[in-house]
Image (cartoon, coloured by chain):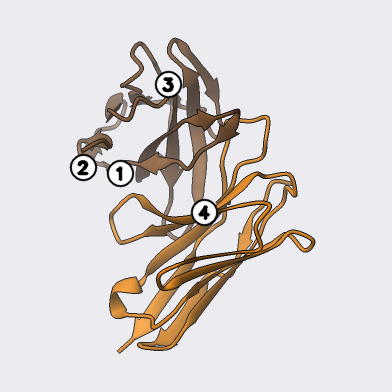
Chain colours: A orange, B brown
């Protein structure tokens, strides 16, 4: 089936690292994406990784990709209260205009 | 600045009424999308359009209709046939580079409620 899976909730203390995990479905997906959604807002693209990469780092964000296991993770270093939001991973299989989104992980940062 | 504009931000529908949600983009993207988001859930695809004057049904198209007369605009009509329209509606657009889908850009959403 076309299910991208994520855990529903994650709670961390301010200053700790957060790791949000995702399992995707199509090993031929060229790009894999991470989006952030704040309350009442649309989705904001955080970062994305090309499928021939294992890791991508962008300031406090690190994306790890394990193609063999179809596993994607997003690590947020030094998590701040402003990072509290819902995080979605997504893939876009080749040969289609569609994007498939996970159910989202709600990150709560405790002060 | 380029982006996607959705309007209105809040919309109320009476029983038996059709309502139209607006989505405009100035990113020069060919593809546009409508998603529905229910509380605590992910995004479900309603309709998408790859090019002007063409569109395809997504996973939950029943009770909705769209048009794509201009590249910049992709309005969504929620018809009276949609019995449970209360949700957050998101519009998105994207382009392709050498046949590969580039990241989607999203509007700020429209929250639709029943009166």
Judging by the rendered image, the residue that carries numbered circle 1 is B109
Q: CA distance from mark 3 to mark 4?
A: 31 Å
Q: Say which element carries label 1.
A: loop
Query: Mark 1, chain letter?
Result: B
Q: CA distance from mark 2 to mark 3?
A: 19 Å
Residue that badge 4 annotates = A48
* Residue underneath mark 2: B9
- The quarter of the image holding the C terminus of chain A is bottom left
The disc, 1 or 3, on the residue closer to the chain's N-terminal end is: 3
Name the chain under label 3. B
**Residue B109 position within the rendered picture, expressed as x and y whole percent measured from the top left:** 30, 44
Both labels 1 and 2 in a single chain? yes
Few, some or many residues within 10 Å of mark 1 (<14, 14–19, 20+): many
Q: Is residue A34 visible?
A: no
Circles 4 and 2: CB distance less than 8 Å? Answer: no
Judging from the image, what secondary structure is the residue with disc 3 in?
Answer: strand
B23 relative to B68 in the view: left or right: left
Whether residues under marks 1 and 2 lie with C-beta atoms below 8 angstroms apart, the answer is yes
Residue A46, quarter of picture: bottom left
Q: Are marks 3 and 4 on the same chain?
A: no
Q: CA distance from mark 1 to mark 2?
A: 6 Å
Please provide percent x and percent y for residue A102: 57, 55
First of labels 1, 2 by sequence position:
2
Q: Which residue shows up at 55% across the image and 35% down it?
A: B101
Q: Residues within 10 Å of mark 3 (few under 14, many from 20)?
A: some
- Residue at 72% x, 51% y: name it: A25
Residue B65: image tag: 3
Judge if badges 1 and 3 mark residues of a common chain. yes
**Residue under the image location 64 percent in, 30 percent down:** A96
């Amino acid at each position: 089936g076309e299910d991208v899976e994520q855990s529903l909730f994650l709670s961390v203390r301010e200053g700790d690292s957060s790791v949000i995990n995702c399992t995707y479905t199509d090993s031929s997906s060229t790009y894999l994406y991470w989006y952030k959604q704040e309350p009442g807002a649309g989705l904001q693209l955080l970062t994305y990784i090309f499928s021939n990469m294992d890791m991508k780092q962008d300031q406090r964000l690190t994306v790890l990709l394990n193609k063999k296991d179809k596993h994607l993770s997003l690590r947020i270093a030094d998590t701040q209260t402003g990072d509290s939001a819902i995080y979605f991973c997504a893939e876009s299989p080749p040969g289609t205009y569609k994007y498939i989104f996970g159910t989202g992980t709600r990150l709560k940062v405790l002060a | 600045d380029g982006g996607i504009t959705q309007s209105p931000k809040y919309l109320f529908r009476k029983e038996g009424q059709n309502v139209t949600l607006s989505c405009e983009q100035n990113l020069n993207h060919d593809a546009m999308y409508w998603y529905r988001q229910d509380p605590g859930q992910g995004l479900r695809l309603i309709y998408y359009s790859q090019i002007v004057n063409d569109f395809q049904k997504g996973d939950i198209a029943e009770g909705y209709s769209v048009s794509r007369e201009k590249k910049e605009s992709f309005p969504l009509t929620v018809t009276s046939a949609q019995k449970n329209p209360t949700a957050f509606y998101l519009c998105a657009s994207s382009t392709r580079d050498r046949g590969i889908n580039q990241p989607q850009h999203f509007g700020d959403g429209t929250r639709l409620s029943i009166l």
